[in-house]
Image (spheres, coloured by chain):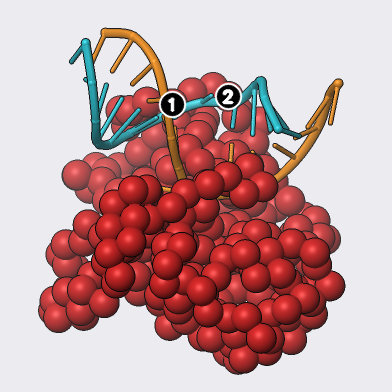
Chain colours: A red, B orange, C cyan
Amino acid sequence: MAEGHTIHNLARRLAPVQGSYVRALSPAGTAVDLASLFDGSIAGPAVAHGKHLFWSFETAPTLHLHLGMFGRVQVRLHRRKPSDGQPPTDLPVAGNVRLRFVDTLRKVDIKAPTICEALDADEVAMVRAKLGPDPVLGGPAPKRALDSIHRSRRTLAELLMDQSVIAGVGNVYRAEVLHRLRLDPFIPGREVTPEVFALVWDELVQLMPYGVDSGRILTTDDDLERWRSQLDGPRKPRPTPHYAAYLRTGRPCPRCGHPIAARDLSGRRLYWCPRCQTEGHS
DNA sequence: GCCTTATGTTCAC
DNA sequence: TGAACCTAAGGCT
């Protein structure tokens, strides 16, 4: 589920590779030149900003990743320790792996990314300059985001998914956060009060870290409670999320029983409860 | 097995 | 507004 939480979760999973000598390969043969840029370098930190990942290296450019709809990244420990003490470059390949990194302990397989490219520092800055603030990083509701909301003719629901306004929110978090707060998705941007925007921002700041930790979009009180009640540990099982509105067209709203509605809005499906999501108008 | 849909973004018309 | 990218899962037959 590649909304922002997925990418922050990925950055965390890449942290153990930092400082390692890595080999980079293109198992599918579709990114041979790209792989050669990173082959033999030392991995640095991976940083997430919204749905974008920036993975730096000591003697190479930064790898810029965006998973889009279909992209996946697997980070797996090797089953066996390499006998020669070198990163194994002859491991089996499952499916279409665009780019693979290996160190002596683990492999990182990148499949079907929308963006997978090498950037220098200036180019990274240019990409990041187009992204709004990221709720996973926390902090108070940013004035910059509210300003762009006020300048817009679009609705709150559309603006929430504009990555230049807020970075990292996708269609699931949008539907679930608006539902949790009983907010009407169609409030015009210029009518969004600072109080309403603060509610939305604070809710994202509170909810998204659970997504980063669990790797799943947890937004209902039951799911959150179930996750919190489990003991932390390396084998903590990944929960199955239950949504209140997302993908629940025609099924009863868990709060008021009215059927969940769905419609296309700027090319994306919006799910909401027309009866109880009426708040937020000034 | 086949068809539809999906967490996203960019580009062409 | 629709197509393209190109993968996986679920519903259906």
- Provide residue C6's location: percent of width, then percent of height: 51, 26
Is the residue marked by circle 2 packed among few (<14), some (14-19), or many (20+) residues within 10 Å?
A: few
- Provide residue A152's location: percent of width, then percent of height: 80, 67
Q: Which one is nearer the viewer's eye here, A67 or A14? A: A67
Where does label 2 land, which residue? Answer: A30
Residue A102 visible from this viewpoint: no
Q: Quadrant of residue A241?
A: bottom left
- Provide residue A264's location: percent of width, then percent of height: 57, 45
> Residue shown at 30%/70% (left/top)?
A256
> Residue shown at 58%/24% (left/top)?
A30
> Residue shown at 37%/48% (left/top)?
A249
Q: Secondary structure at mark 1?
A: loop
Is the residue marked by circle 1 packed among few (<14), some (14-19), or many (20+) residues within 10 Å?
A: some
Compared to A263, does A157 lie above or below? Answer: below
Q: Which one is nearer the viewer's eye here, A31 or A44? A: A31
Q: Is residue A102 found left or right of A57 in the rendered image?
A: left
Compared to A126, does A106 lie above or below? Answer: above
- Provide residue A118's location: percent of width, then percent of height: 69, 46
Compared to A274, does A270 lie above or below? Answer: above
Type of amino acid at the residue the image marks with label 1: Asn
Q: Which one is nearer the viewer's eye here, A178 or A28? A: A178
Where does label 1 land, which residue? Answer: A96
Name the chain letter of the residue that bears numbered label 2.
A
